[in-house]
Image (tube, rainbow, N blue to C red):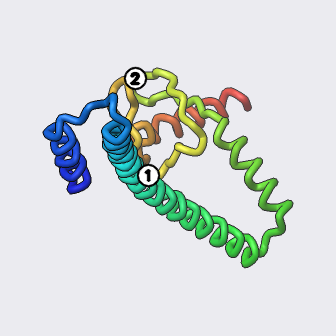
Amino acid sequence: MSRLDESIGRLRGMADSLKLNPKKDSHRMILALVDMVEELGEAVAQLGQAHVNLAQGYLDLSSYVDAVEEEVSDLAGVVIAEEEQAASGDASAEDAASTAGAAEEADDRRIEYECPHCGRTIEIAADAANLDEDACCPVCGELLFPELTEEDPENEDNDEDDDEEEETED
């Protein structure tokens, strides 16, 4: 309870203890003044609560503005870096646009490859295909691109088949 509420309570208590008669003009004025002071006290309490709410809203808004300001700063840094990179690059804007278009088309291309072990056809995104890595077949788990050496029997079989084909063609 605030000091104002305590003072208003004491004033109301004194007025009640005087047993003021509301029919007398002088008493009626004192009772009206006490009622008005009570109403003013309630209004001040409401204003105090509104001030607390406003201060909390200001703090919330300030935090939000800080977060937005940080994001804008980050985005500005990205835009500036991209502009600097574009300005320092040798390619013109048209070259960059055509390169970007070609990259998008490459992303859409797919390669069909038959697993040398299980014979299943596997579809691989063109940009994901890397012959230097050990990619495995999702069906049998074996290497999709095994390294062939000169001593590899599969390689020799293929050479013999090629020789036989050449002989039949002659």
Q: Which residue lies furthest to the right in this view?
A: 94
Name the amino acid, label 1.
Leu
Q: Is residue 91 visible?
A: yes
Closer to the camera in the image, 69 or 131: 69
Q: Mark 1 points at which residue?
A: 54
**Which residue position holds label 2?**
118
Nearer to me, 99 or 6: 6
Labels in figure, total: 2
Q: Residue at x 21, y 41 (%)?
A: 15
Q: In this view, does 118 lie above or below 39?
A: above
Residue 13, image quadrant: top left
Q: Which residue lies furthest to the bottom in this view?
A: 88
Q: Is mark 1 on a helix, strand or loop?
A: helix
Query: What amino acid type is highlighted by mark number 2?
Result: Cys
Q: At which x and y percent is residue 9?
A: 19, 45
Q: Which residue is drawn at 53% across and 39% down?
A: 159
Q: Residues within 10 Å of mark 2 (few under 14, many from 20)?
A: few
Q: Determine the secondary structure under disc 2.
A: loop
Q: How far apart are marks 1 and 2 (CA)?
A: 72 Å
Q: Is residue 37 left or right of residue 124?
A: left
